Image (cartoon, rainbow, N blue to C red):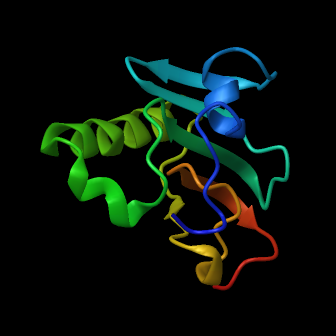
Amino acid sequence: MRDEAVSVRDCIFCKIHRGELPATVVNRADGLLAIEDINAKADVHVLVIPERHIETFRDIGERPEDEAKRMLDFVADTARSVDLDEYRLMIFCGAGAGQTVFHLHCHLLGGEVRGLPR
């Protein structure tokens, strides 16, 4: 395990899924949650988070194939629910790439993007 790894008990996104921490929910489906990012880098900045604790994108292959597809379908549904026709989808994989919370999540960004590479 890398130094960045945290237990499911201590993971901020796991705590949000369990209702232990507040979040502004944008969309919810079986095993998936979309919330507003509290440190928004765009006009619309939503985090899409699977309930199952998966540390990084590199670990997605350990999950059933349909789980990744369901997550991508959920991203598209979430984008529609916040009236985004055009958007960026970003996943940071590892500390060196900028991942700060080690629970797989996608950043759904729409409108003007601030503070990110173009």
As drawn, which residue projects farthest toward the front?
1
Residue drawn at the location 23% of the way across and 45% of the way down: 63
Q: Nearer the viewer, residue 113 or 83?
A: 113
Q: Position of residue 6 (x, y in %)?
A: 64, 49
Q: Is residue 12 left or right of residue 107?
A: right
Residue 96 against residue 37 in the figure, above or below = below
Q: In screen coordinates, is 37 left or right of 18? A: right
Task: Please report the residue visible at 70 percent of the width from the left and 14 percent of the height from the top.
Answer: 19
Numbered label tally: 0
Residue 82 place in picture, x, y as percent: 59, 34
- Residue 30 in percent (x, y) is at 37, 17
Q: Nearer the viewer, residue 12 or 118?
A: 12
Residue for point 61% across, 31% down: 14
Q: Nearer the viewer, residue 51 or 38?
A: 51
Q: Quadrant of the C terminus?
A: bottom right
x and y percent of residue 87 in the render? 53, 58
Residue 113's place in the image compared with 107, above or below, is below
Question: Which residue lies most toward the left here?
Answer: 65
Residue occupying the point 33% across, 45% down: 72
